Amino acid sequence: MGRFGKFNSSVLESCDSVNVPILKAAELGERWPVLLWFYLKTLGLYHSGRLVRPKLCSRCDHSSKKRHGFYYTENQCKVCDSLTWDHRGVPTVFTDNDIGSSFFNHRGSGFLSLIWLLLITGATLANIILLISRFHDADCDIVHVLAWVGMKLLLYIGPFVCLTSVVHTTWPTVFMGSWSNALAVEFLVHRMGFVNMKNKQFAGYALFLGSLGIMCTQCLKIAAPFFDPELVSAMSANASISGLTTLVPLEVFVVIEGYINFGGFCYVVYLLRCSYESEIRLVTKFLCNNIGDIDLCRARLAEAFDAYHIFREFASGWIALNLILSTVCLLLELHLWIVDTTPLAFFQYEHSFLLFFFLLLPIISLGNVDVDYLWNRLVRQVSRQRCLEQEKSWDKLMQFLQEQRAGTRPWQAVLAFFLSAIAIFSAIQFRLWSNNQKVVFVHTNTNGTVLYH
């Protein structure tokens, strides 16, 4: 028997040696927050089937294709058992009713999710096209128009990623790559099983209240031109007054769904990040309990890496889009501040504040500009469990961890883009600022007359 066969036999032998006590979620009396299901609904991530699906390790999944229900045997693979642990490390079984998703996930949810995301896409594109078409009717700088368009695109990043994930889930061959699986609702539900949802719900409610507050200010901004046009820019006043029947309804819809979905998307990403932070503790516990079986420990680490790799691929693209668009929009806003000699309208300052909100909130949700720190944290935690009696076993696990380390992401190129953009912007703005300055030359004639140029 080869090395692969030995690995399989080791895992299968462990299946016969485990007696798993299962704790039902209904016995805990802890339902997941309603806000999570509301966000998943507004983001269009539901489908018509069950959200709770059986989660087996890759080895058992290949040998158990006939399993269609979420059930357990008394003698269960230790790796599969660890995938059902909650945040305390207790194997827990739950159903859609237990976690409270049945009310939002009904018949036809998949079709409605796709239609909803396509509606958001159409409304956003129509809003951008109408803004650009009305540019000539308003006395404003083209840079201001570009900053507004950038804001609409920032609001659309979340629904666009969700639309890509839904299309990939429905037609897996349309979009290649594993990153879109990070938002598959079954994957999300399984990851939430590692999180203490009771403690993490407060972050969601804080984001929801913040999104409501910003949404109300943006609705006031739309209505402000009818009361005091000086509060907004010329383009905003023209868009609200002249576009009362077409642009204003689209603007209100994009504002309401955009800010709600932006906060909800950041909350979902935050919960995903928390699930990996919790899994680090659970994996470390599993390794300490099974350090005598190297192949079993490697199988559990492989499952952790596969899930982490999906999240890493998704997070790197999402944070890059947010950082690039937010930075470009901020630079455009600074251009208006420098070039415009008259005081800006009140809501233009508020617009700049929102751009900082768009820049910082995704970073806070991920905990960094990338998620490589999560894998590094797992490596450190495993390394600290070393003991002299089983030094060789821990050395083999550390070697396996180093072999599984993901490749470097092209953050150097992204950073170079930021620095180049800032350098070019600074040079242009310094030139404009210099041209706007009044340079005074003083000359004295022979007769004592002083001339100013």
Image (cartoon, grey):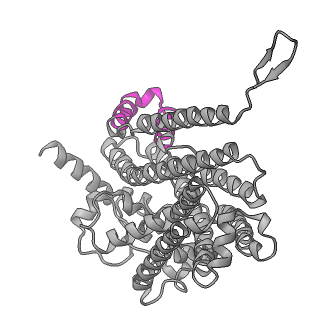
Quadrant of the image occupied by residue 223: bottom right
Residue 388 magenta-highlighted = yes
Residue drawn at x 68%, y 61% is 203
Residue 132 position, x and y percent, is 52, 66
Residue 408 position, x and y percent, is 38, 37
Residue 169 magenta-highlighted = no
Residue drawn at x 78%, y 59% is 346
Residue 306 position, x and y percent, is 36, 52
Q: Please state the total of marks drawn on the protein image.
A: 0
Side of 277 relative to 48 (left or right): right
Q: Using the image as rendered, state which of residue 288 and residue 137 is in the foreground.
A: 137
From what the image shows, is residue 106 above or below residue 322?
Answer: below
Side of 151 relative to 168 (left or right): right
Q: Residue furthest bottom?
A: 107
Q: Using the image as rendered, state which of residue 63 and residue 417 is in the foreground.
A: 417
Quadrant of the image occupied by residue 291: top left
Q: Residue furthest front?
A: 447
From what the image shows, is residue 51 above or below residue 295?
Answer: below
Q: Residue furthest left?
A: 1
Q: Can residue 371 be seen in this view?
A: yes
Q: Which quadrant of the rendered structure holds the C terminus?
A: top right
Quadrant of the image occupied by residue 432: top right
Instruction: Tell me the magenta residue range.
Output: 374-402
Q: Using the image as rendered, state which of residue 98 and residue 356 is in the foreground.
A: 356
From what the image shows, is residue 161 above or below residue 31?
Answer: above
